[in-house]
Image (cartoon, rainbow, N blue to C red):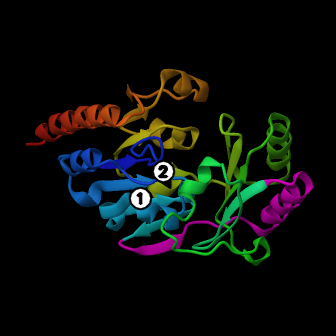
């Protein structure tokens, strides 16, 4: 049984680290270390500094666009050139802020006060390059969209591209990856037919949570309702909430394992 963790807002609440108590309790789960998976909207570059000692586990980054297994990083599916060209046109037309990732480097125009800044290359491992030098984008974020812009741009993208689109209306952002790419489809590529438990807190965790043997929502019931996501368990978005959720899953795994003894 795999256990899959989203990072930001699920097991990390400051954008920089995972609390030591959470790390300790993850390590005490009754599963082998290779059963741990961390799945994030962050690219691998931005995942490595925050997962710390778990860097050698399976990492799913960029909402499924890129993975790392045993330190081997590979792109699952890049964004098609024609779709990228349209997004660049929309950026120019609306004067949008953005983060566009390739396999390692990125092109970004982000306001100083934007929350995403603290998640962007925190380990100073890459370069912020000119947008024109990105040739194989894996994930794109359009930032700080006004309500009307978000609606217009989403409509244009759905009509004129094949991109997978995740709207974060509360954050006024849009996440974009290649068609058919999300955390769950990439999990299936890496671990076909494997059962799993999933922890998540956002719309980009939807497919993982829907297909999990046990699903854990970290956050408010109102946010889950807004995203129309149903889960087996729900705990508050705090270290104490995650610890309680991990204890619940620990007990469930012990019960499941005992059936096969």
Give the answer, above or below, for where 232 lies relative to 104. above
Residue occupying the point 23% across, 34% down: 247
From what the image shows, is residue 227 above or below residue 143? above
Bounds of the magenta segment = 70-96
Q: Position of residue 121 (x, y in %)?
A: 55, 65
Residue 78: image location, x then y, percent? 65, 67
Q: Is residue 136 left or right of residue 66?
A: right
SS category of the residue bearing label 1? helix
Q: Nearer the viewer, residue 118 or 76?
A: 118
Vertically, is 88 above or below 261? Answer: below
Q: Is residue 85 magenta?
A: yes
- Residue in the image at 28% along x and 55% along y: 35
Left or right relative to 93: residue 199: left
> Is the residue marked by circle 1 packed among few (<14), some (14-19), or many (20+) residues within 10 Å?
many
Q: Which mark is residue 50?
A: 1
* Residue 196 x %, y %: 35, 45
Labelled disc at residue 250: none
Q: Are marks 1 and 2 in contact (CB under 8 Å)?
A: yes
Q: Earlier in the sequence, mark 1 or mark 2?
A: 2
Q: Nearer the viewer, residue 93 or 78?
A: 93
Q: Residue at x 85, y 60 (%)?
A: 86
Q: How many marks?
A: 2
What residue does disc 2 label?
A: 15
**Label 2 crowd bin: few (<14), some (14–19), many (20+), radius 10 Å:** some
Residue 201: image x %, image y %?
A: 48, 37
* Residue found farthest to the right: 93
Local SS, label 2: loop
């Amino acid at each position: 049984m795999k256990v899959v963790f989203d990072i930001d807002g699920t097991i990390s609440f400051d954008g920089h680290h995972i609390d030591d108590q959470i790390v300790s309790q993850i390590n005490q789960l009754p599963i082998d270390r290779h059963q741990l998976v961390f799945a994030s909207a962050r690219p691998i570059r931005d995942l490595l500094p925050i997962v710390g000692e778990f860097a050698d586990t399976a990492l799913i980054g960029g909402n499924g666009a890129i993975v790392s297994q045993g330190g081997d990083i590979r792109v699952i599916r890049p964004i098609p050139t024609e779709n990228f060209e349209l997004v660049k046109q929309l950026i120019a037309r609306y004067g949008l802020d953005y983060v566009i990732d390739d396999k390692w480097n990125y092109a970004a125009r982000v306001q100083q006060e934007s929350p995403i800044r603290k998640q962007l290359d925190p380990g100073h491992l890459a370069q912020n390059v000119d947008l024109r030098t990105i040739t194989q984008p894996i994930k794109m974020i359009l930032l700080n969209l006004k309500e009307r812009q978000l609606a217009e741009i989403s409509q244009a993208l759905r009509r004129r591209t094949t991109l997978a689109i995740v709207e974060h209306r509360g954050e006024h952002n849009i996440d974009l990856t290649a068609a058919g790419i999300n955390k769950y489809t990439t999990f299936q590529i890496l671990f076909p037919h494997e059962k799993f438990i999933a922890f998540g807190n956002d719309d980009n965790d939807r497919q993982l949570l829907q297909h999990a043997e046990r699903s854990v929502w970290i956050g408010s019931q109102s946010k889950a309702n807004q995203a129309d996501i149903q889960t087996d368990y729900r705990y508050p978005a705090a270290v104490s909430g995650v610890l309680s959720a991990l204890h619940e899953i620990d007990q469930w795994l012990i019960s499941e394992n005992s059936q096969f003894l």
